[in-house]
Image: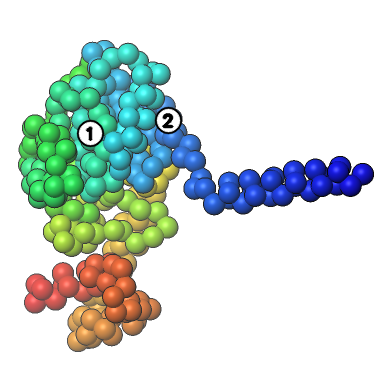
Amino acid sequence: MRSTIKLTSGIAAALLAAGIAAARQPAQDPGPLVRNIRGGLYFVKGGMAFNGFFVYDKGVVVVDAKMTADGSRQVVAEIAKVTPLPITHILITHSDLDHVNGLEGYPKGAAILSSEATKKEMEEAFRDEKLAGLRAYLPTRTFSRTHRLSLGGEIIDLIPVGPAHTAGDMIVFFPGLKTAFIGDLAFVGRDPLIHRQKSGTSFGYAQALETMIALEAETYLGGHNDPLSKDDLRAVLSSLREKQDQVRALVAQGKTLAEVKAAFGVAEPAAGAAGRSRPGLVEIIFLELTEKM
């Protein structure tokens, strides 16, 4: 009996130890979640930012990369489950690293397209020796006005709308499929994210939203949300415009930045806090309004 009790206790202890060890392990990445939107168009969730791809008769067009090369390789593996065709084009909506850092995970040789401003931002970022491998993935074609691709009978309009979230934001619009990839040009449940250090502006962001709403699209695929509708974008625009109007009224009353932030309940970050140098939306709107005065 005693030996049985010792054996059972040993097993229990081992199981408990294994459970604790498992609990300490990070959750396993389930990998990309691929959803067909319409026709040959697919939306890819997972990772720090979402992206997608389009299959046409001669190849595959990928929109954006993942944060890591491994994340993009997972997307390549998912594409292979859909088609054996090669990736022929990579379209970059903007320069944030969670949309371009994984470019090394894509096969080389594809045409890489972006706005002119996005290429400049990528060149600046890739000067970092830690990102030297990404220099081979700088855009091969850039533009400052709407550029139209026709692939396999499907039209793809590449529409630069920056500065907004960044200086070089671009909408990738599939008019025949009534779908647009919009990068980080809409967030639901939080304020728009505007990179002032990349010349992003709140008023440019609002104009970008107006441009997207005017498209004959039914589905909008962003980098950090489930698919959005036109009504979702209208709600984002309405909230942004309301905040801009409120800040404008306070500025007209001669309020200081500190007073404006206090009116919105925006607390000052502690000294040395992460992100302290990155202004929030209210501060950005205030700075844009007062810099024009």
In percent of width and height, residue 170 lies at 19, 42
**Amino acid type, residue under disc 2 in the picture:** Val
Q: Secondary structure at mark 1?
A: helix
Disc 1 and disc 2: Cα gap in Å? 20 Å
Q: Is residue 108 above or below residue 285?
A: above
How many tags in the picture? 2
In percent of width and height, residue 266 lies at 35, 76
Residue highlighted by disc 1: 104
Q: Is residue 231 above or below residue 137?
A: below
- Does residue 27 appear to the left or right of 221 in the view shown? right
What residue appears at the point 13 percent right and 50 percent down from the top-left corner? 128
In percent of width and height, residue 250 lies at 25, 81
Q: Secondary structure at mark 2?
A: strand
At label 2, counting other C-alpha atoms closer than 10 Å, the crowd grade (few under 14, some 14-19, many 20 or more) is some
Q: Is residue 200 visible?
A: yes
**Amino acid type, residue under disc 1 in the picture:** Glu
Disc number placed over residue 34 in the picture, else none: 2
Quadrant where the C terminus is found in the figure: bottom left
Q: Is residue 183 visible?
A: no
- Does residue 169 appear to the left or right of 9 in the view shown? left
Q: Nearer the viewer, mark 1 or mark 2?
A: 1
Disc number placed over residue 48 in the picture, else none: none
- Residue 220 figure quarter: top left
Instruction: Pick out the residue farthest to the right.
Output: 1
What residue appears at the point 36 percent right and 46 percent down from the top-left corner? 48
Quadrant where the N terminus is found in the figure: top right
